[in-house]
Image (cartoon, rainbow, N blue to C red):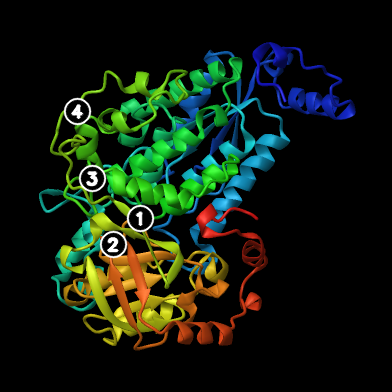
Amino acid sequence: MSNNTNKVSLRSQWEFGEASECRRGLMLGMGYSEEEMKRPLIAVVNSWNEYNPGHVHLDKLAERVKQGVREAGGLPLEVMTTAICDGMVLKDPKYIEIPSRNSIADQVEITVEGNFFDGMVMLSTCDSIVPGHLMAAARLDIPTIMVTGGYMPLGQCRGKEVVHIHAQDKVGTAQEGKIDMDYYNDLISKSWGICGACTSMTTANSMCMIAEALGISLPGNSSTSAVSSQLYLMAYEAGKQIINLVNNNITARKIMTVEAVKNAIKLDMAVAGSSNLILHIPAIAHEAGYDLPWWRYFDEASQQIPLLSHLAPSGPYSLKDFDLAGGMPAMLKELLPVLDGDCLTVTGKTLRENVQDAVNYNKEVIHSLDNPVMKEPGIGVLYGNLAPEGSIIKIAAVPEKLMKFRGKARVFDSLHDGLDALRSGQIKPGDAVILRFLGLKGRFGTTAFTFQEELKGIPELYNTCAIISDGRFSGGSSGLSIGYVSPEAALKGPLGIVKDGDIISIDVPARKVELEVDEEEIKKRLEEFSWVFPENEYPRYLNLFVKNVGSMAKGGIWE
């Protein structure tokens, strides 16, 4: 396929025989000219819809992208992908994000590869869509720029700006009748803005930052407000710049290199990004053909990179504060001594060149390496006989007194059973709550978000209990919450043989999670263990997902 303007113009009308002429006739029939069809064909891969607040404004950004493409000499053609919002799907496992993420990557492959586009500009904002698009970019390896949709403006409630996560924190409290309901309803109705990624370090903003750290989006894109004029200017500039990438044959993998992926992991640690990045970053890397032990790199980075910005939900600052302090360019400049600054980016310049003039306007929001917020990193990998292949914890969000824990297991084989127990008062202070069969093979990578949030609203439990799951956690994970336990229970992992009353010990500084049961007993339980996926309970696509999805350590891509 051609990736050069001259080659595009020389593409023979007979290149694919009758098919070429059919395509030419169809394009002419839609009103395109012969001259336009000789331009670089740019897919404007949009995920706009009216149901996802992170994406509801992307139609307007796409118009600016297309304007830039046309002015630079290309022909922009807008195509669409799915865009499910993590906050809108009500956590029904029939519609959760990881199956949609993999489907989005496939949709891009089918549409962009099938139509012989020469480059693409991808527009997305939210949890599963940004990684789905990045996976497709890595898979297709054509010139690509991502435009992310910016962070959501802060809400305003009773005379103050509010971050949405603080409204979510009150759900459990409200259900127990421990908060004034007028105030609670005010918070819920006024804490979210009109569009953009929810204003904290949940998965959406985390993934937008990862895109920029990879070099696949323009400098500052991930820390620009969704309602800023600067975002529309960036969309226009991306449309113009994609033609330069096509002309110079700068494809996605020339930017998304192994070194760039390692930069992204280090950035993740510095901002305490979403725990879901432990799944998404390896998926992107493996789609690019980089078959490396990525969880090991997360663990190494967790020991080396301190926390430089303490953003909500674990810290006091919002994305607006981060933006005002200088945003991602300032953060990457502070991190530059430990990054590979020679990595190429979509500007055609190196990462170092992109950030050399960045200014940090607030050292309380964006710290330096020699004066970090804390040396304990954002995300850590815990191992032990309960998680032989690893498990993930958001260290920055763990209360200090829970860094070491020992408690009795309360075991639930579904999220609903766990929630029923929590709501009926069956969870007691000091319990180690096991939520299992939620992994990719067990239940499509269900998130324990609802359980986390409701527990958070009950201080006597939030400050004493552990949550351990083979499912995912929300990007807003907090407390002693351990997810992605691998191998998952559905793959005969040790989590599947834990019984009520077993003692679980956790040592976060030592990166350990252990089942205090004799090795012979563990071996016996594993030999007796059996579990079969209830395929008759789910529609065909989800059955197809379960049969083909790979390990969490490789990001849950297709085997």
3 sits left or right of 275 in the view: right
Image quadrant where one finds the C terminus = bottom right
**Residue positioned 34% across, 40% down in the render:** 267
Give the residue at mark 4: 360
CA separation in Å, label 4 and label 2: 34 Å
Nearer to us of marks 1 and 3 is 1
Check residue 510 in the rendering and tell me which mark sits there, or answer none: 2
Give the residue at mark 1: 475
The amino acid type, in three-letter code, at marker 4 is Asn
CA separation in Å, label 1 and label 3: 18 Å
- Is residue 338 in view? yes
Outermost right residue: 18
**Residue positioned 36% across, 85% down in the render:** 502
Nearer to us of marks 2 and 3 is 2
Tag 3 secondary structure? loop
**Residue positioned 56% across, 36% down in the render:** 45
Image quadrant where one finds the N terminus = top right
Q: Dot 2: few (<14), some (14–19), or many (≥20) neighbours within 10 Å? A: few
